[in-house]
Image (cartoon, rainbow, N blue to C red):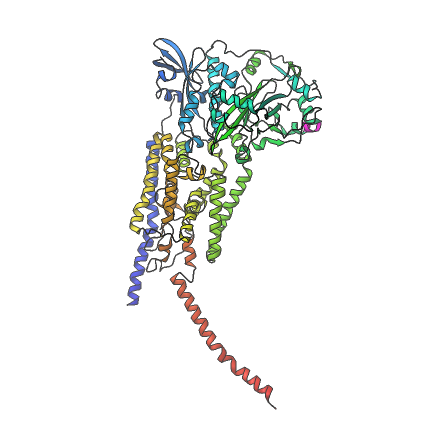
């Protein structure tokens, strides 16, 4: 009878093993067929027209130029289209990214369709495409459009000469670089179109080009250097800045001064191009200048910035992300921003009469930017004043710098060279692959410490997985290690480094494969790229569990909240396995919908991806509009009663990682024959119900938390291990019971011998 029962059990197990062996092959065949169908239907044909042609179909001519009724054909390279009112040309339509570099934080261009009148005024503008994370995840696009529309009706020639005529950068903190890129690229592109179309007053003066005079010696007196213009100065009081906010109509900024005394110094700032030999030797000393020259590459410049006052030009942005976000340097069509890698702090300025400065810093221009100190350039300071709990008011101030004539000498250059330099030798065109490579390398160098910490954490996780038997055999150690890792993931990876993966990254990657794929776009965010690489590599070994179970900040938040709820005896909702299986399909449906939408409209898919609360809870740390906070709070509250509820049923990111799970090369999770028949201990305790009632683990749902492996070795919880423990204890007790009787006779003989007369 027992033998027959065993045969029945073996036959069922054998069939289950065969089904599990064949199932991945069937799934692989379906995936390959689906991929081929997708490539056939989704791969676009090569378009001969520029982006301008596409965008002109989305905006009527009257939107770019009031009174216009149609566009002419797209002409020239870079592309531009004439705007007509009847038969009369009334303006020109163009995309900023076609004419100048408009790359933002995302590593992709911010594309704005602009209209320019025949007299050189911006007549219309619309944001057409962008992938800026701060706009996608937190700042309403209406604020960006309001800022863009502030340029309508303004003369581009005056905008290019003085930024005081530009709309104030009045937008919430975090989008400083994005908004500055928009402003700079709009104006520079419009100026280039005006020059190309030969508008009155727009031609670049073909002045005689000058070069640095190496024989010139700068005066050894600070006041003389400032007076002659070798050192530029921007000096403002608190009252002057308040008045500027009032003129700009920004009452929030005007009502929140740095001090109550208007005559207090807001900032007393000085700049000087120390890559000019005469100035560099005077301000840095002979030895300091020699060391600087050794550190510079051809075409690279260096600027000294020193300041006193209540306001710091450095701010704290470079501490958070390696970027100095309170100032920029512009020359020609180049807008230069500095990272901490290009920064050195100096002890002071060793020139007679120089004041003692609170901040003295040296900034080297990026290696991919040509900085010509003989040409005019501009230092732009972004002033910001906090108001309310989190909001800030912004205003820009300019310091225009022109090297004094005494430092220059005429350069007899052929006309073609003169014309090229007059057009701006430092122009940055849309990044070719070599420049793109240099940019992402700069990003990585600026994140060296963060990358090291993240790689160390991934290394620790790899050791945990490879030596999982060591940890799971020690339940207390395993629990403490997992708890510490989850806290690290939430606090450091999530809230500090803000390296939360999203389905937006998946959609952007798939879209790039179909269009213009460049690694440089994805290498712009080092921590995100490292996490993606780790997640992809780990899927070959442990399916999606390495990321979803250990490295996802929002997943860690849910699990920690559920741990707290269990400690507080919050009742847990039990979901039947049948209902659970049906609910898990939701996340796959959500992902497929987002993927389908992204094939035709990536921007809409990115907006629909707000179903993920990651951005609100992790990236912005709940500093967002109340509907988003309410939704994120609801998802977290659900985890009080159902552990990782969002991960189980709604996460499109988890669905994207789960789809290739069955293609893993190894199966590291160990099971007994008794698992599922009759024992259900692991299935009942699995935090995401990834274990089926018959005992096998669903790799699509498993998050590799290793809880089932802890139970596998636990001789107080696992029935198989309990039986083995009881058998060992019984054998030990039996051995102990017989050991004394076998040892007594010798002892008695020895005792008797010793006591004999």
Looking at the image, how many numbered discs can be counted on the residues? 0
User: Which stretch appears magenta?
Assistant: 286-290
| Image location (x, y in percent) of residue 357 | 65, 29
One can see residue 481 in this view: yes
Percent of width and height locating residue 490: 46, 44
At 70% from the left and 21% from the top, the residue drawn is: 221
Tell me: 669 left or right of 165: left
> Which is more toward the observer, 567 or 229?
567
Q: Nearer the viewer, residue 302 or 569?
A: 569
Residue, far bottom: 757
Query: Is most of the magenta stretch helix, strand or loop?
Result: helix
Res. 467 visible in picture: no
Q: Quadrant of the C terminus?
A: bottom right
**451 on left or right of 149:** right
Q: Is residue 224 left or right of residue 200?
A: right
| Image quarter of residue 229 | top right
The residue lying at 37 percent from left, 22 percent from top is 54
**Where the N terminus falls, by quadrant?**
bottom left
734 vs 508: above or below: below
The front one of 63 and 129 is: 63
Tell whether position 98 is magenta: no
Q: Is residue 633 above or below residue 161?
A: below
Q: Where 594 sits versus 150, above or below?
A: below
> Which of the 4 image quadrants contains residue 417?
top right
On screen, residue 629 above or below 685: above
Q: Position of residue 415 (x, y in %)?
A: 57, 11
**Looking at the rendering, which quadrant does residue 326 occupy?**
top right
Find residue 642 and report its horizontal and vertical position in percent: 36, 49
Q: Residue furthest front?
A: 260
């Amino acid at each position: 009878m027992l033998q027959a029962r065993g045969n029945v059990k073996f036959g069922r197990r054998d069939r289950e093993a065969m089904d599990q062996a064949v199932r991945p092959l069937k799934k692989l065949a379906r995936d390959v067929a689906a991929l081929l169908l997708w490539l056939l239907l989704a791969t676009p044909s090569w378009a001969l027209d520029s982006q301008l042609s596409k965008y002109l179909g989305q905006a009527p001519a009257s939107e770019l130029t009031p009174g216009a009724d149609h566009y002419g054909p797209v002409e020239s390279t870079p592309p531009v289209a004439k705007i007509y009112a009847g038969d009369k040309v009334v303006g020109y339509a163009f995309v900023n990214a076609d004419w100048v570099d408009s790359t933002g934080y995302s590593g992709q261009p911010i594309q704005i369709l602009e209209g320019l009148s025949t007299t050189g005024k911006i007549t219309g503008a619309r944001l057409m495409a962008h992938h800026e994370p701060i706009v996608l995840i937190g700042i309403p696009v209406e604020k960006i459009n309001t800022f863009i529309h502030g340029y309508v009706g303004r003369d581009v020639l005056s905008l290019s000469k003085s930024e005081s005529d530009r709309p104030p950068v009045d937008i919430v903190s975090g989008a400083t670089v994005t908004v500055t890129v928009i402003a700079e690229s709009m104006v520079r592109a419009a100026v280039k179109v005006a020059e190309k179309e030969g508008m009155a007053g727009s031609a670049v003066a073909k002045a005689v080009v000058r070069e640095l005079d190496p024989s010139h010696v700068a005066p050894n007196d600070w006041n003389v250097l400032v007076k002659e213009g070798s050192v530029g100065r921007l000096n403002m009081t608190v009252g002057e800045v308040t008045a500027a906010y009032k003129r700009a109509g920004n009452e929030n900024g005007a009502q929140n001064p740095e001090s109550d005394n208007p005559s207090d110094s807001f900032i007393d700032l000085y700049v000087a191009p120390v890559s000019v030999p005469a100035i560099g030797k005077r301000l840095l000393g002979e030895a300091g200048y020699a060391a600087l020259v050794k550190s510079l590459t051809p075409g690279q410049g260096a600027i000294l910035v020193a300041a006193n006052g209540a306001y710091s030009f450095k701010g704290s942005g470079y501490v958070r992300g390696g970027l100095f976000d309170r100032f920029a340097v512009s020359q020609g069509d180049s807008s230069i921003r500095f990272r901490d890698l290009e920064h050195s702090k100096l002890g002071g300025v060793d020139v007679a009469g120089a004041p003692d400065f609170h901040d003295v810093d040296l900034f080297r221009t990026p290696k991919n930017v040509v900085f010509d100190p003989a040409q005019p350039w501009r230092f732009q300071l972004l002033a910001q004043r906090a108001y309310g709990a989190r909001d800030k008011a912004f205003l820009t101030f300019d310091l225009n710098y022109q090297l004094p004539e005494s430092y220059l000498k005429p350069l007899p250059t052929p006309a073609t060279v003169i014309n090229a330099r007059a057009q701006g030798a430092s122009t940055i065109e849309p990044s070719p692959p070599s420049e793109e490579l240099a940019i992402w390398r700069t990003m990585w160098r600026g994140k060296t410490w963060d990358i090291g910490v993240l790689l160390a954490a991934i290394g620790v996780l790899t050791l945990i997985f490879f030596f999982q038997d060591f940890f799971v055999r020690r339940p207390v150690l395993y629990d403490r290690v997992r708890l510490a890792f989850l806290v690290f993931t939430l606090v450091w990876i999530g809230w500090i480094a803000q390296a939360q993966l999203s389905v937006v990254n998946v959609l952007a990657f798939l879209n790039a494969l179909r269009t213009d794929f460049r690694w440089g776009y994805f290498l712009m965010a080092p921590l995100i790229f490292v996490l993606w690489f780790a997640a992809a590599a780990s899927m070959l070994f442990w399916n999606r569990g390495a990321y979803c179970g250990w490295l996802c900040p929002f997943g860690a938040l849910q699990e920690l909240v559920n741990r707290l709820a269990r400690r507080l005896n919050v009742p847990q909702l039990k979901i039947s396995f049948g209902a659970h299986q049906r609910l898990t399909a939701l996340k796959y449906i959500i992902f497929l919908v987002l993927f389908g939408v992204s094939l035709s409209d990536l921007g809409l898919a990115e907006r629909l991806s707000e179903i993920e609360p990651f951005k609100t809870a992790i990236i912005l740390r709940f500093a967002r509009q109340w509907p988003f906070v309410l939704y994120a709070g609801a998802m977290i509250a659900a985890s009080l009663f159902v552990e990782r509820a969002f991960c189980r049923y709604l996460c499109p990111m988890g669905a994207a990682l789960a789809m290739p799970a069955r293609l893993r090369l190894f199966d590291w999770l160990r099971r007994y024959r008794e698992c599922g028949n009759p024992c259900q201990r692991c299935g009942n305790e699995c935090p995401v119900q990834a274990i089926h009632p018959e005992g096998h683990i669903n790799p699509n749902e498993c998050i590799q938390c290793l809880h089932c492996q802890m139970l596998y070795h636990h001789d107080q919880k696992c029935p198989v291990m309990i039986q083995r423990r009881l058998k060992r204890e019984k054998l030990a007790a039996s051995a102990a019971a017989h050991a004394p009787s076998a040892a007594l006779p010798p002892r008695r003989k020895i005792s008797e011998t010793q006591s004999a007369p």
